[in-house]
Amino acid sequence: MMTTYDDDHLTNKNLDRLADFLHKELTAPSLATEIPTGAHLFHGSYKDVALTQGNLELASNLLLGMTLGYVDDAPLIMLFEQENGEQFLLDLSATISPKQATAFINQFHQQTQQRVAAKLNQTLAI
C-alpha cells in the first residue's frame, strides 16, 4: 500500500532542495553535467525519509505513466544527500525496472480477461 504525502509540503521541500542545488552548482559545479537532458529530477536525503519516500512514490507513478504510454520516456534521477551532506546521483530508471512494471500490467490484463470470460461463461450457463 502506498502512503499518501501532503503534496504541497512535498512540493515546497522539493523547491527548496532544487534552489539549494542550483545555488551550489552555480558557485561550484559538480553534478549538474551528469544529469541527463530531459531527466525527471527527484530529491532524497538521509536525514529526510518523508521527502525521499514521497519522491520515490512520485518516481514510481511517473514510471507507471511511461509504461502505460501517457508520459514520455525520460530518465528518472534522484539527487541524494548523504548523512555528511555530500550528494550523489542515483539512476532510478535502472533501479525501478520498466520491464517489471510492464510484466505486472500484462499479467493484470491477462488475469482480468480470464476473470471476465469466466464470469460471462458462468452467467451464460445459467
Image: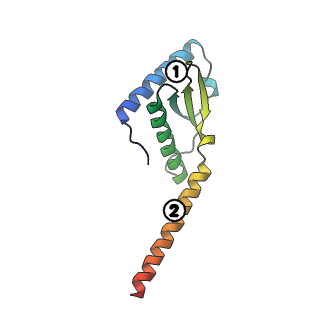
Give coordinates of residue 31: x percent, y percent: 61, 23
Q: Amino acid at mark 2?
A: Phe
Q: Amino acid at mark 1?
A: Phe
Give coordinates of residue 60: x percent, y percent: 51, 44
- Which residue lies under the disc numbered 2? 108
Q: Residue at x 63, y 41 (%)?
A: 94
Q: Is residue 21 above or below residue 59?
A: above
Give coordinates of residue 80: x percent, y percent: 55, 27
Q: Is residue 93 left or right of residue 14?
A: right
Q: Quadrant of the C terminus?
A: bottom left
Determine the image quadrant of residue 107.
Answer: bottom right
Q: Is residue 82 above or below residue 68?
A: above
Give the CA separation, mark 2 to mark 1. Answer: 40 Å
- Which residue lies under the disc numbered 1? 21
| Number of numbered callouts drawn | 2
Q: Residue at x 46, y 27 (%)?
A: 48
Q: Which mark is residue 115?
A: none
Q: Which label sits in the foreground, 2 or 1? A: 2
